[in-house]
Image: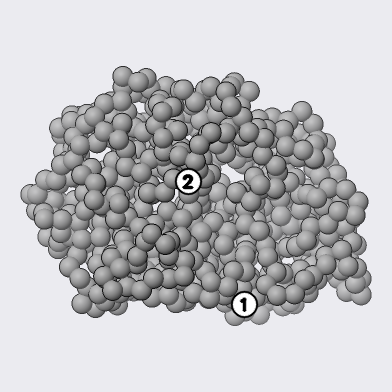
Amino acid sequence: MKLLRFSFILLFLNFLPVLTIAQEDYNVKEHYNKTEVDIPMRDGTKLHTTIYSPKDTSQEYPIIMQRTPYSSRPYGEGQFRSLIGPNEYLMKEGNIIVYQDVRGRWMSEGKYDNMRAIIPNKSGAEFDESSDTYDTIEWLIDNVDNNNGKVGTWGISYPGHYAVASLVDAHPALKAVSPQAGIGDFFFDDFHHNGAYLLSYWRATALFGYDKTGPTTEAWYDLPDLGTEDQYQFFLDVGPLSNLDEYYGEDNVFWQQLKEHPNYDEFWQSRGIIQHLEDIEPAVMVVGGLFDAEDLYGPFNTYKKIEETSDNYNIMVFGPWSHGDWARQTERQSVGNVYFGDNLSEDYQRNIETKFFNHFLKEEGDGQVDLAEAYVYDTGARAWNSYENWPPKDAESKVFYLGDNQKLTQEASENEETFVSDPKKPVSYNDEIKAVFTPREYMTGDQRFAGRRPDVLVFETEVLEEDMKLTGEIMARLKVATTGTAADWVVKVIDVYPPDAENYEETMDHLDMGNYHMMVRSEVMRGRFRNSFENPEPFVANEKTDVNITLQDINHTFKKGHKLQIQVQSTWFPLIDLNPQTYVPNIFKAEEEDFQKQTHSVFGDSAIEFSVLK
């Protein structure tokens, strides 16, 4: 077994963005005092908390707090973060900024529980992440000088999940919450997509799976070293998932949980946060990246659920960002090879995020804040759109069928396209040799390499004679069959550039944007869950079967001269694990002989449903 000790900083950068100051240097230590305290929760457990308070005490300030499993460092007197708060503007104008190690992490006491379940109707010393937030706010309001009695929470990725948790049974002082790329449910975010295990997250299991013995300033976990940059070959050589036990033993609690709960049972259901979002009172601003490879389900469904169940102020912002890009201040915003515009994150931070927190935490009265209901970037037209509703109510349904001769058609047909899916030669998610935790750039990656494989079906329109703006959720209604009893189904929505498209500065040297196949959206469905995530079932060999896949929302104009393309495949490696294509009760326990080559069919009455804005 080969293990690699990673420094905390390197690991931290893999999961969260780094805030950057665009122009001038700013010394936090000159403007803020720092205090470290251990705040007691209702059960007596103490959570380590770092408080940055403005040195200017001539006025009162709101408290803006982030709870994190990734450490509230740096620890120790005289040790300061170089940047604090959601952005540089909120830092410079003065706020009380608080970071807290969640229960069981770093310098906090207690036992960590990955995606700890919410306990409805708690009593006595019962606790969850909602009550830990409540108890922390209560202590801060009572004990931190010069606070104005109003609190906001924010966070990106896992800290975004803790921001969502703060909304449940919220403290009365909590007025503004911004969950950003917040995890909604680990069966649909991060570690799974529609029940398919994201093998790309396997190394991150070390981060969440090992218990520590007490408060610590040093990492207590090791991360597996692949020993190669060729992760495709590494995982192919490993074979069945059970062989990965060589790297994680029984002391890795989360690895054991993943293996023992392959279905959407009570273990996963109880850890979802979306179902608890009812009668929310604080103002909410959900933020996400349209090309976030980690958390798309959580942000979209957090916003939508609150819209359905609550009468609070609730808005959303989705830009052309990968995971956490909005917290940076890169002048040119790009994802992979594709450039989207200049200073998009700075504009968001200055004109949306800062305005949101200032209005609800500093301004008096109930005046309306000058923000739209939904800011969503058009990733094809390269422009922000403001909407009164999301998804837009005036969008019209448009259906394409997967026809013959690789065509997207307006009518269903009796066409049948077949391909052989071989677990020993799976389709890759990209064509790079690169070992990464989360393959961010593939979200806009060039899909020509995949479309030219015999085990990837391609369907596309003619060259568009006018712009076509697709917005909102996408539904793929596949009609399929397989010679086996199990299969995964992957659908990709692709923007095919014209042959004379110009390169961007970001375009890799070996690529050309002429005929670039930009992935706009994609999703997988583990076929056993086609009817129920709780109760999986095999396919009947050679029987035509419905498989419906919901693809997360888009806002993309397919420009005149481009083409809309759909690709359908059955492997997506090593983004997701290999399906043995022989039904077994638990893929984590599949054996080598279970992995069999099978022939899959896609029928011409398969439909892809979009919403079109005129």
Residue 351, labelled with which disc?
1
Is residue 326 in sight in this rendering?
Answer: yes
- For residue 586, side relative to residue 244 (left or right): left
Identify the residue shown where x is 18% and y is 34%: 599
Q: Quadrant of residue 345?
A: bottom right
Residue plotted at (42% across, 56% down): 443
Give the crowd class for mark 2: few <14, some 14-19, many >=20 residues within 10 Å.
few
84 lies left or right of 15 = right
- The picture places residue 604, in percent across and down from the top left corner, at 13, 51
Q: Work out which quarter of the rendered image holds the C terminus and state it.
A: bottom left
At a point 31% along the width and 22% down the height, the residue shown is 594
Q: Are there few (<14), some (14-19), or many (20+) residues within 10 Å of tag 1?
A: few
Element class at badge 2: loop
Apparent side of residue 453 relative to residue 18 in the rendered image (left or right): left
Displayed quadrant of residue 104: top right
Q: Looking at the picture, how far across and down is residue 526, in whole percent?
A: 34, 38
Q: Give 234 or 552, whichever is nearer the viewer.
A: 234
Total residue callouts: 2
| Amino acid type, label 2 | Lys
Q: Is residue 225 left or right of residue 459?
A: right
List x then y, in percent, for residue 400: 20, 60
Image x and y of residue 74, in percent: 80, 50
| Residue linked to disc 2 | 434
Question: Is residue 54 at all visible to an observer of this figure?
Answer: no
Task: State the residue lying farthest toward the left.
Answer: 414
Q: Residue 199's mark?
A: none
The relative height of residue 584 versus residue 6 in the rendered view (above or below) is above
Q: The residue under label 1 is which amino acid type?
A: Asn
